[in-house]
Each structure stands twice: as C-alpha cells, then as structure tokens.
Amino acid sequence: MLVDDNLTNLNVGKNALLEHYDILPATSAEKMFKLLGRVTPDLILLDVEMPEMGGYEAIKILKSNPETAFIPVIFLTAMIDQESELAGLSLGAVDYITKPFVQTLLLKRIELHLQLEDYNHNLKNMVEEKTKTILEMQNAVFELLAEVVEYKDDVTGGHISRTQKYLRIMLDELIRRSIYSEEVSAWDPRLIVLSSQLHDVGKVAIKDSLLLKEGKLTDEEFEEMKKHTIYGAKIIEKIESNTTGRQFIEHARLMALTHHEKWDGTGYPYGLKGESISLEGRLMAFADVYDALVSTRPYKAPFSHPEAVDIIRQGQGTHFDPALLEVFLAVTDKFLEIRRDERPSGKD
C-alpha cells in the first residue's frame, strides 16, 4: 500500500513498483484506513507530511490496532535529519526512505523488509508450534497424574472428567454475564479447565486407609484429609519450577489449595474469606461440591439434582461467593445434562 497526498509522488512510486508488486494507492491516511477495512497489505509505504492526518499520527493508530499492528511500515519523507528519522522509528516504522525515490534502492529496501517479515512470521509459527507441543506433553503428564489420583481414590471415579465439564459451563456463563470481567479477561478458559484436573492431586499423599474408609472420618482423620489441599499445592509448585506454561500451573496450584475454602472464612486449609480466596478456587468449589453431592460415597447416599442445587443455594454467602451462585443457578440444567451423560451413581 502506497500512501502519499502528492499525486506526482504517488504515480512515480506506483510506476517504480508496478512490475514487481500489486500496488494499492491512497492519497490520504483516511483513505488508507478505509482500504485497510477491506484488505491487509504485506507492507505500507507511508508519507510523513500529509494534510489533516500525517504519517506519525497514522502509524500510532496502526500500531494500536491488533489487526494492523503487525504490518511493516516504511516512512516516505523529504526530511533527511536524524531527529525526524529517529522519531519515526521510535513509533514503530521499520525504515525511512527519502524522496525523490531511487527506484533500485526503493525496490531493494522493500524486498529486504518483506523477506525479514516472512522470516519473522515463520519463526513465530515455529515457536508457537513448539510451545503447543510442550503444552500438550505437559497436559498428558497432568492427565496421567490425575488418573493416578482417581485410581487411588476409586470411590470418586469420573469425578475429574465431570468437574472439568461443570467448570467449563460455569466459565462460559461467567464470561457471558461479564462477572469478574477484569480478572477473567486475562484468562484462557481452555487452560483453566485443563488445570482443574489437578485440584485433588494432593490426595496421592493421603493414606489409603483414609481415602477408602467405609463410614465417616474421625475428627483427627478429617484434619489429616484436609491437608490434601496443601500437599497438592506443594506438588504443583515442584512441577512449576521445572516446566513452561506457568499460567497453566498457577491456575492449578490455586485450585488445589483453595477449592475447599468458604466465602465466610470457615473453610480450609487457611480459613480464607471472601475475595481473598482465589477466583479459581471459588469457581472450582461449585463443580466439586455439586459432584460430591450427587455421587455415591462410602459415608452417604447420593442426593438428587434438585436436592443438590438446593443445598448449594443455601450456601449463599457462607460457603459460596454470592455472585458466582447466580452464575451456577443459571446453568443447573446443563449440570444435570452432564451428570446424566457421565452416569455417576445416584438418582435424579
């Protein structure tokens, strides 16, 4: 794309490049932006001095828009002082070409920057592919670790799969309603759901005699069981120190540590209260508690779906974040669908 308010310069530039490139001419920055609404050029040649909107102002707009920020911009100018050149480069231009054009030099500079842009694009794709492979390998390890927990704690079979699905439903509704939007906007929902599979990983450090005990735990046994949250966080911290994808791991650590905390401060392991509990943990609490209520346990029969929903509703402001409770109540039908599909032991 060639942008210059001077028709003579525009024609000279167009003629110099026409044999080698498809040229999109524009006589002003405003016309450039209209063209950018329909087509994305590989490179923009942008005049610095134009009426109404100059090149410096135009490049600021280009670089502030994610859809155009990556397009390389070469400034065209009759100014040859170093101060002007530095100003343009500091705004994100890749080069400066002085007018009147020298055709061979103009062509060589454009060729150089297009080759560099192609190299950077290929390099970016390679990095993204490598990162994707690493994350997939990490996720495979985490899935295996989560399966170990389920084999060890076999009374909760399918719990991890179901809670992941419940959590995704909660996240989608949370985003739709723009609740806690400032925090959630920085999240990748896919990573949140994947990381949730480690929320009970600390149970690998709990004795089988406690996990598989028939009947209710004693107070002393329950105190030991509570420690699975701390054990889980410590296990994940060790993984974190030897891996990439730190955001993924941090979500997992917070869920493992805080999914048994309660809004009123009566939960464990630290008795955190209100928003001092991580949002990840507050969300995970709904998925975890719902699945526990509707599933068979050695110490209880399963509750029906309406009974479970009512129990959670009664926990508003005590066990559960009131804002998130509204999200849960809006999607209980979807929870029921997942429960029926996964077929945990229990009645409707």
Image (cartoon, rainbow, N blue to C red):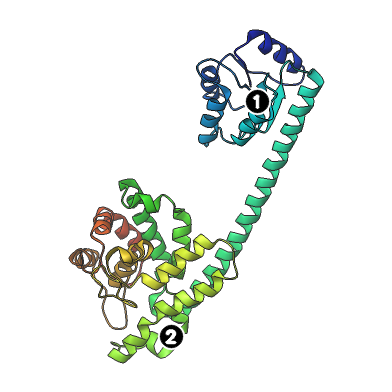
Q: Nearer the viewer, mark 1 or mark 2?
A: 1
- Left or right of residue 246, residue 168 in this image: left
At mark 1, the secondary structure is strand
At mark 2, the secondary structure is loop
- Residue extending farthest to the right is 104
Marks 1/2: CA–CA distance = 65 Å
- Looking at the image, tell me whether mark 1 or mark 2 is earlier in sequence order: 1
- Left or right of residue 291, residue 319 in this image: left
The residue that disc 2 covers is 206
Q: Residues within 10 Å of mark 1 (few under 14, many from 20)?
A: many
Residue 196's quadrant in the figure?
A: bottom left
The residue that disc 1 covers is 75
Q: Nearer the viewer, residue 228 or 85?
A: 85
Up-down relation of residue 196 to residue 270 (above or below):
above
Residue 323 is at least partly visible in this image: yes
Q: Residue at x 30, y 69 (%)?
A: 289
